[in-house]
Amino acid sequence: MERILIVDDDNTINTMLKEALTREGFACGQAFSGTEAMLLLKMEAYDLILLDLNLPGISGEELLGKLREGDRIPVIVLSAKDDLDSKVDVLSIGADDYVTKPFEIKEVVARIRVQLRKRTGTVPEAKTIRIHSLVIDPGQHTVTAEGKEVPKLTRQEFRILELLAQNPTHVFSKDAIFEYAWQEPYIGETKTLDMHISNLRKKLKQASEEEYIETVWGIGYRMKGNTR
């Protein structure tokens, strides 16, 4: 069982994350200051850290710097700062990912799984996904719609569809989709993702007239609710 250390001085957020991640099968430790986090990291081993920046005692940035002097444990920063410069600065000093508050817990879980997969090099068991008239086979990397084979998808197109189909009622932000599909931090560029979504829609259209992917303006994308 992977162990996650949640470092956030906001008791509500810290507890919410622990409860949600525990339900997802993770073991969680909690720290409410940078100093407390340092003590816990000396006593116990963790597989990933969720790190707030605005911490009492040792700041999040200082803690991240200390971590990067040693182990390369994945660190996902949680911050209310949403400007591009803040994201670039934190990624440049060693953060593996950056999540802007307020966040959706499903996005955090998806990003955690990406980082853990990178760290361990393991691939989850491939399971066929059936949603509406779509059948997605990760093992064979194939998709059928209404029984017709969809033209071969690129790796990123496949992972975009896989993410949306696994969570059909959830609206995913562009940064969450990008980071799941490309497995690298998103720093604000949208044209690449939008192009892949457009190409994915065109390929799905070649097998079915159904509209499978819905744009939620100002937020991102999800599976279209009225799809059969």
Image (spheres, grey):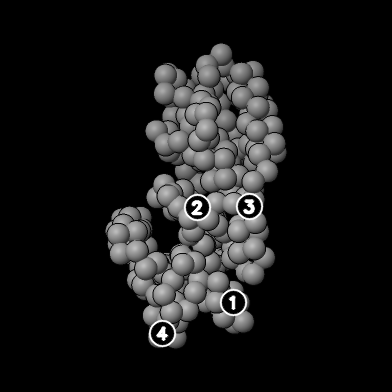
Name the N-terminal-most of marks 2 and 4.
4
Left or right of 156 on screen, residue 112 = left
Q: Is residue 165 visible?
A: no
Quick one: label 1 or label 2, which is nearer the N terminus?
1
Residue at 70 percent of width and 36 percent of height:
191
Q: Comparing marks 1 and 3, which lies closer to the viewer?
A: 3
Q: CA distance from mark 3 to mark 2?
A: 11 Å
- Residue 19: x and y in percent read 29, 58
Tag 4: amino acid: Leu
- Mark 1 → mark 3, Cα distance in angstroms: 20 Å
The mark that comes first in sequence, 3 or 2, is 3
Is disc 1 in contact with disc 4, using a CB cutoff of under 8 Å?
Answer: no
Q: Is residue 47 above or below residue 210?
A: below
Q: State how far apart marks 3 and 4 are (Cα).
A: 32 Å
Q: Residues within 10 Å of mark 3 (few under 14, many from 20)?
A: few
> Who's the residue at 45% across and 52% down the image?
101
Q: Kindly check if marks 3 and 4 are in contact, taking CB atoms under 8 A apart as contact.
A: no
Residue identifier under label 2: 100
Between 228 and 62, which is closer to the camera in this rendering? 62
Tag 1, which secondary structure? Answer: helix
Q: Residue at x 30, y 59 (%)?
A: 12
94 to 24, vertically: above or below? below
Q: Counting other residues with Cα less than 10 Å from the Cα at mark 1, is it few (<14), some (14-19), or many (20 or more)?
A: some
Q: Which residue is mark 3?
A: 84
Mark 1 / mark 3, whichever is N-terminal: 1
Instruction: Please state the horizontal and vertical placement of residue 163, each as a whole percent of the image.
Output: 51, 40
Instruction: Name the residue carrying label 4.
Output: 39
The quarter of the picture where the N terminus appears is: bottom left
> Circle 1 sits on which residue?
65
Query: How far is the residue under mark 1 from the one under mark 2?
Result: 20 Å
Where does the image place residue 53, in percent across and percent down from the top left?
49, 66
